Amino acid sequence: MSNPAGIFVRFLTTLLLFCVSGLTAAAEPGASYEAPLPVQLSTDPDLCAYVPCKDVMPGADSFSHRMGKPAYVEAYRNKKDGHGEQKGRAEKDRQSGSDDDKEAGHGKQKGRPEKGGQSNDDRELIGYVFLSTDIVDIPAYSGKPVVTLIGMDTQGIVTGVRVLRHSEPILLLGIPEAELTKFVFQYVGKFVGSKIEVGAGTGQGTIGLDAITGATVTVIAENQVVLRSGLAVARQVGIIEPTIRPQAKFSKMENKLDWDALVKNGSIQRLKIETTEVGMPRSAQPYIDIYFGYLNAPAVGRSVLGDSVYRSLMSRLKPDEHAIFLIANGVESFKGSGFVRGGIYDRVQVAQDMDTTTFRDLDYLNLYGIEAAGAPSYRESAIFIIRSPTFSAAYPWNLVFLANKMDRQTGAKTFVNFGREYWLPSSYLVGGRPKIEKPEATWVTVWKSRKVEIVLFLLWLAASATVYALRDKLVRRSTMKDTRWKDTPRYLLWITSIGFVGIYLLAVPSITQVLTWFHAILFEWRWELFLSDPFIFLFWIFIIVSVFFWGRGMFCGWMCPYGSLAELTYHVAGKLGLKRFQRHLLPQRWHDRLKWLKYGIFAGLLAVSFYSMGMAEKLSEIEPFKTTFLVGAWNRTWPFFTFWAVLMVASVFFERPFCKYLCPLGAALAVPSTFRWWGLKRKKECGPCAACAVGCGSQAIDEAGRIDQRECLLCLDCQILYYDDHACPPLVKERKRRTKAGEPLTAIASDGYFIPIVPAAAAPVAAARQSLPAFIGQELFDHLFPWSRKALQQPRLLQAISLALAVLVTWVWVLGAAGSIGPGIVLGWWLAWSVYELVVRMRCKPYVKEGPWWGRNLRPASWADMASYVAFKNLLIAITLFLLMKGTGVLDFMQQLPSLQWLY
């Protein structure tokens, strides 16, 4: 290894080529990951013309068109093919169900109603096939639903489940898609009314399913998809008896209420959907704005309709019929544009648990006016009649509005629903509201199921922060010859990070999560998406805080599971006799070139993600985290295993090659490290002295003695040297001088020098502290304006161009925040402004802060320093402005200005 730098560069080049070609080729998406589905799938009556219905209903010869609400299709078989193969299996599975299910009538075969039966005597009905997205809209870990085709026989037994499309990144590359297929196959032969849980069954009659390690959220969501879809269809066709809820008994209310009082106490609810929520440009009018309420309750009906109209309406209703009213404004109609006599109102539904009511023309009555004082104006109105013996106003129900939503990233349209819960006030009901147990959100179930691990993980995070916060005490007790005080807690954190956090909890942060944040901020933020994995959620909160406190080194150097594994591999290999083959450092000139690779990889992944998130997730396999912890190297195909093995072998001979040169996550965390509050301590002699730089494993100390916090992994060796009077040249010099002169050796102060024997003269009185308004003004000027007085020395034309560019980019950003132009244009302009600001600042304000942001300790900035500062500062400014404009209603005000109406 006479030329280690050349060998390492060639190795790194080969490794990158392997990443781009071999891994990408091997990472072809599975049959269902982001699989393109025909646009007619959600609307065409002939469902089975677009999906393989026979795969989930073996033995079927033909299928009906969609019927019912929610929609399903009937599966038929010619009578000559035989009868009833599955009756025994149905009876056996029902016997394994819970006693509660049996008491509720679950599993009782009632037969198919004649209205949807066979078209002729040569066919028999053998089951039902349905698409999950026709029934439920449950997001998985990706925030998107797993589109699933399900087959169920006439006994309520699942005959087949097939995933048509999913967007789960962990099932793209981390876990073989065959595992998802294996998971859903467990439903075959089970009764849809059984209590089925992911994991070992926790109660009598509960059926447990084997989960997919590393994809807990995905399988919990899919379990809800299969069971809730099956229950909805089984209840509709009569396999499972409907749940009969006790009807409401209303209290006597003498006084009528005005509109505001009805809204305030919940008697009238509002469902408002903006145009941007369905992928349309922002409009001065909402997509739909509906007020609705339950009219059977006297307090509501009399107040909204007046006494005479209310009495007339109630006289027309049968005992099991209920009336609701709707008034609405907006660019869309709740009646739907395609309504015809004899048809249905396909835009609105009423849902109570799994029971859904869709309205036909005979269920519609005209609403001629609102009697309640203060009612808003409206464009359309209606009274709809709910004709269902299972509906009860004593229990909560939802008004559901259905719409086509366009994905602003891909342009694809999907069928989505928006709902608003309605529950009569307790004072309107005799005895008050009944007690009910609402189903938990998926993320709540996950958090509750792992309470012990969450507590242990929080303790681990707290211990890690405490250890690093006490770093000054640890390094003072250590010397360059004995680093146990610093190394022992660090080794313990590495070992627990690998074993507990990485292998057991599978809590491995990834660049894919950073990309998801960018897209969530720009397109749609959903807390459920980030709460679905408690350990990743908590880890990222800690990482964000620690990056602002200490820079990326706290996570990358002490807590990252893969970084810990690479570091331990290097040290253990040295102890096993390979130290003479190891190369602690590369020549600085090569390191300074290669370290930019990870930033290029991060920027490339971010750019690709706006073109295709799926492609970016595939390319993010440059991170070996999934192979190491989530799946296991031995379970991967040869390109992934080879890539992982090459990196591990490289870690034996080079200290953290992946972390230093390839890790896109490290690059993403390095950018905000410029804003850290506390850096490592330095002396004025650190410039000409190179003692620290010689032993810096991160090679983060430059010739001037400055530490690059973006590259520093906080090994703290330089801090041990800082206090070591036998290793730090300035301290060694002072120690020898004092010893020779017979002077006592005083303690070393926090500034890294011996405390003077003779107290120094009193320091001059400090100047008066800057006032708060002056401080805020200076900060705003420094951060918002890249120019200084030097800009006035430029030609007038350049000054005018600069001012025009600033005004234009600000206006473009405002239009983007208002939804008038796409995020791509905003990003392009914001990037152009950032590049311009970078150049201007390097000419006018070529400095950045060192240490806490509230201080004024400035240092000369390199181009990398300034690029990190500008990029992250502008991101924070954009987010802050957007949230302020949304929160204060500025955007809504702008839309109402006549001079700006042309924008919308």
Image (spheres, grey):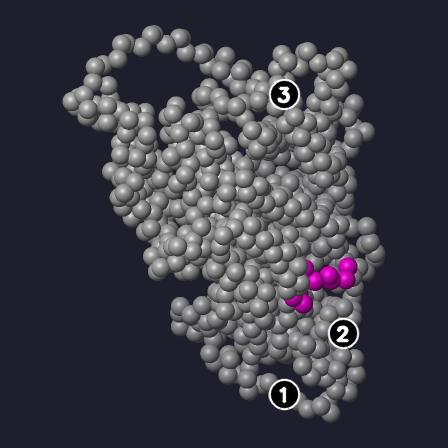
Q: Nearer the viewer, mark 2 or mark 3?
A: 3
Give the Cα distance between marks 2 and 1. 20 Å
Q: Which residues are magenta?
A: 29-39
Quadrant the C terminus occupies: top right
Q: Position of residue 554 (x, y in %)?
A: 41, 42
Task: Name the one closer to the observer, 275 or 327.
Answer: 275
How many numbered marks, from 0 up?
3
Q: Main secondary structure of the magenta part?
A: loop
Q: Is residue 428 left or right of residue 291?
A: left
Residue type at numbered disc 1: Gly
- Vertical relation: 813 (above or below) 388: above
Q: Position of residue 18 (x, y in %)?
A: 62, 59
**Which of the two labelled residues, at mark 2 and mark 3, occupies the earlier sequence position?**
2
Asked if residue 140 shows in the view, the reply is no
Regarding mark 2 in the picture, which secondary structure is present there? loop
The label shown at residue 84 is 1
Task: Name the one closer to the observer, 675 or 644.
Answer: 644
Regarding mark 3 in the picture, which secondary structure is present there? helix
Q: What is the crowding at mark 2: few (fewer than 14 residues within 10 Å), some, or many (at least 20)?
A: many
Residue type at numbered disc 3: Arg
Q: Are marks 2 and 1 in contact (CB under 8 Å)?
A: no
Q: Are marks 2 and 3 in contact (CB under 8 Å)?
A: no
Q: Nearer the viewer, mark 1 or mark 3?
A: 3
**Which of the two labelled residues, at mark 2 and mark 1, occupies the earlier sequence position?**
2
Task: Name the one closer to the observer, 167 or 222.
Answer: 167
Taking the magenta stretch, the answer to whether it contains residue 33 is yes
The label shown at residue 64 is 2
- Vertical relation: 877 (above or below) 197: above
Residue type at numbered disc 2: Ser
**Which of the two labelled residues, at mark 1 and mark 3, occupies the earlier sequence position?**
1
Q: What is the crowding at mark 1: few (fewer than 14 residues within 10 Å), some, or many (at least 20)?
A: few
**Residue that badge 3 annotates:** 843
